[in-house]
Amino acid sequence: MLQQTTVEAVIPYFHKFISKWPTIKKLSESNIEDIMDAWSGLGYYSRAKNIHKTAKIVNKEYNDKIPDNYEELIKLPGIGPYTAGAILTIAYDKKASVIDSNIERIILRIQGIKKPKDKVKKELIKISEELCPDSRSGDYVQAMMDLGSAICKPNNPKCNLCPIKKFCYSYKNNLVNLIPIKKTRKPIKIREAYLFWIVSNQNRVFLRRRPLTGLLPGMLEFPSSDWITKNKKTKKEILFPIKGNWKPVTGNVLHTFSHFQLSLKIYICRDVNEKKLEGIWKKENDISDLNLPSLMKKVYKHVFSNTNH
């Protein structure tokens, strides 16, 4: 859960997840749709799919015990060099290379490396393993993570509070605001789509589950058209899912994913016969209780703010 997500965001999800699936065995016996629902709102949903796959493998091949060696760990879905190193050091107190964004930044500054981090990955891995102690490696790794998040911050680091500043090349040479070397960002792509808010003659709203592949896998959604890259030359025809009296909702919903921004124009259709669509129908007031991804929560709030009920 902590991959690419802050501790503050993870804590409530973690406690809820662990209380529902306290063991690898229980997790391996779970339904993937339940896992996806519990993950709803955390983002990067491939992590949820991988934790489910890995639980099944660990249950079947390792008798519910996570492996304690790098070669076996790295084979498991969703476990790369960083997670494998974190497991070895924190769970098994073994010496290993662990590099998250915080540790990476500390190493770059201590060593005074004036190259983009992508150009020195092998060097960083080597230094990380050399720095890791033979004993209490888990304490060391977590201390480095905390040092990076609380003191050796990306911007305006608190060098006066840093317990290792006397070892830091960047601190001694006034380079802390120049290192790490910032990578030139590419302009973010914009995709557009139409979203269809469908209300039945029983005053219930239509939802469906997304496929288990692609973005927001297995999550509940309000149906939409394909998410197409914005192109000024192309005027898209609206292909409504059913015939009806469709009306636009004021404004657009914007949502930023890791590699693009999505702009949704919402159209609403009421008094629909529920037999015309196969999916899930929910009362409007019950939608807020569903485990919806962040994008669909935005859609729900936007519709309720801009329509009469």
Image (cartoon, rainbow, N blue to C red):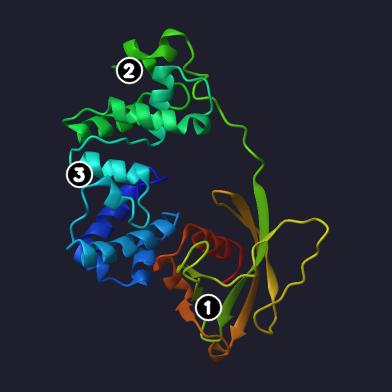
Question: At 36% from the left edge and 58% from the top edge, which residue is drawn?
Answer: 77
Apparent side of residue 148 relative to residue 114 in the rendered image (left or right): left
- Quarter of the image that includes the C terminus: bottom right
Q: Position of residue 106 (x, y in %)?
A: 38, 25
Residue topped by disc 3: 91
- Name the residue type under label 2: Cys
For numbered disc 2, what is the local secondary structure?
A: loop
Q: Position of residue 37 (x, y in %)?
A: 38, 66
**Residue closer to the observer: 162 or 181:** 181
- Name the residue type under label 3: Ala
Q: Mark 1 or mark 2: which comes first in sequence? A: 2
Q: Which mark is residue 162?
A: 2
Residue topped by disc 1: 206
Q: Position of residue 105 (x, y in %)?
A: 42, 27
Q: Nearer the viewer, mark 1 or mark 3?
A: 3
For numbered disc 3, what is the local secondary structure?
A: helix
